[in-house]
Amino acid sequence: MKKVFFAVIFLVCVGFWAISSDDALAQVVDNDARIKQLEAQIDSYNQEIQKYESQAQSLSGELAIFDLQIKQIQAEIDATTLTIQSLKGEIAERESDIAKKEAQISHENSLLSQYLREVSYNESSSLFEFLLRNRRFSDFFNDMNYLNNIQEKIHGTLAKIKDLRTKLIKEKEDLESQKTEQEQLRQIQKRQQNSLASTRKAKQKLLDQTKGQEKKYQDLITKTRADIEKIKNQPYELAQGYKLTFEQALQYAALASRHTGVRSAFLLGILKIESDWGGNVGKGTWQKDMHPRDFNAFKQITAALGLDPNSTPVSKKPSYGWGGAMGPAQFIPSTWILYAASVGNLTGHNPPSPWNYEDAFTASGLLLADAGASQQTYNAEHKAARIYIAGGRWNRSLTARIYANNVMAAAAKIQKDINAINNQ
């Protein structure tokens, strides 16, 4: 009776787990479909914003841009919320897979120990003991076959352990990436809410200033364009507390643009969003905040520049993931090493420094040019921004898409200021 009872309980539990698993899968599929719809809406809003920005400035156009930006940000907030929900489920599933693989490895290690003990026992026996255990030829050959089987099992188990460990390493790397993106998305949500509020506030301010009249709007535009010194001297803050005036930043960006073919406004937009997106989290140290794989590269860079690595500031590690980025352009040491020679050839600095403005701007320009930004089209720059933040995951990461949208919006505003300065 007890056996029947426990069997029923087991089947009920299995059935419940299957239903829960199916429900979770259905939720993920539903979320993914909704996210794709929202991403399509975001792209559509972007295209409409571009259309209005290419037209002559007018009050109706400016208000339309504000309305589209508000809709775009709200769609991004909704997509971010759904992505966080999906990531939560994926992380739990991956953690379960990791636990299973670790249990499998432990089991295979136990089997391996058992097989090795048996081989060791037989190998430690003398010929006399071996013959005593096998009085008949059939016993002798059976024992030999048994030992051969054990040897084969050892080789098979070792191969299985190696395969499991390789998969486990990949699972853990993917888990770390997912947790990093989850944390990034949580931070993005906060910025999105602030951006939504500030965009609504900016729209209302424009309405208050113009009273809805086109003439007052055009007067406002004329006044803004005339105040060139105010535009030049507005603060342009970079990551890690680096501060320039807009005019100074534009000079470095223009140099980098000549070297790399990347548009100045786009480069300044990238560096502006880099600062907004966590470049000012505080100063850290390489031993505590940098990924260990970058240690050697960092020591190589500081040694070439005659700097003490222990007193050279890098970005602080966030709540999840790694810091260790260097200078105003926030380069990771291993990435800087890839571009250092090219930067030095262009700027004439030998060795170049990630803490030098001209070198840092030029390195960012080279990286963005490699990602296609030198084509100077909206789509090419948007893709380059996604690659800049997400690398090989540029086309699969919502974080990268939102980052690129922010960059392009910042670049559009910066381009207006550049145009005002150039037309003075």
Image (cartoon, helix red, strand yellow):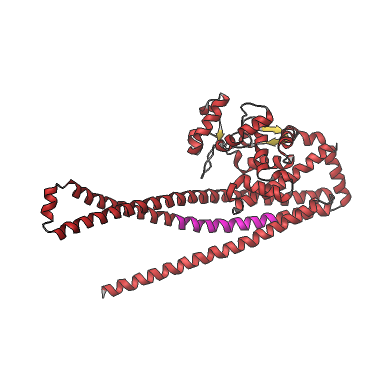
Quarter of the figure with the N terminus: bottom left
Residue 410 x/y as whole percent = 71, 45
Pick the residue in front: 413 or 334: 334
**Residue 211, percent from left and from top:** 84, 51
Q: Could you tell me if residue 119 is visible in this image? A: yes
**Residue at the top extreme of this rendering:** 306
Q: Position of residue 240 (x, y in %)?
A: 61, 35
Specify the principal SS of the magenta part: helix
Residue 298 inside the magenta-drawn segment: no
In the depicted view, which residue is nearer to us: 100 or 311? 100
Q: Is residue 230 above or below residue 39?
A: above
Residue 192 visible from this viewpoint:
no
* Residue at the spot 31% in from the left edge and 51% down from the top edge: 109
Q: Does 348 sit left or right of 186 as displayed?
A: right
* Viewer-side residue, 70 vs 391: 391
- Quadrant where the C terminus sits is top right
- Front in this rendered view, residue 263 or 197: 263
Residue that extends furthest to the right in the rendered view of this protein: 215
Does 338 sit above or below residue 177? above
- Is 76 magenta? The answer is yes
Q: How many marks?
A: 0
| Residue found farthest to the front | 137
Q: Is residue 8 above or below residue 88?
A: below
Q: Residue at x 12, y 50 (%)?
A: 129
Q: Residue at x 67, y 54 (%)?
A: 73
Q: The magenta stretch spans which residues? A: 72-94
For image coordinates 84% across by 44% down, the residue present is 221
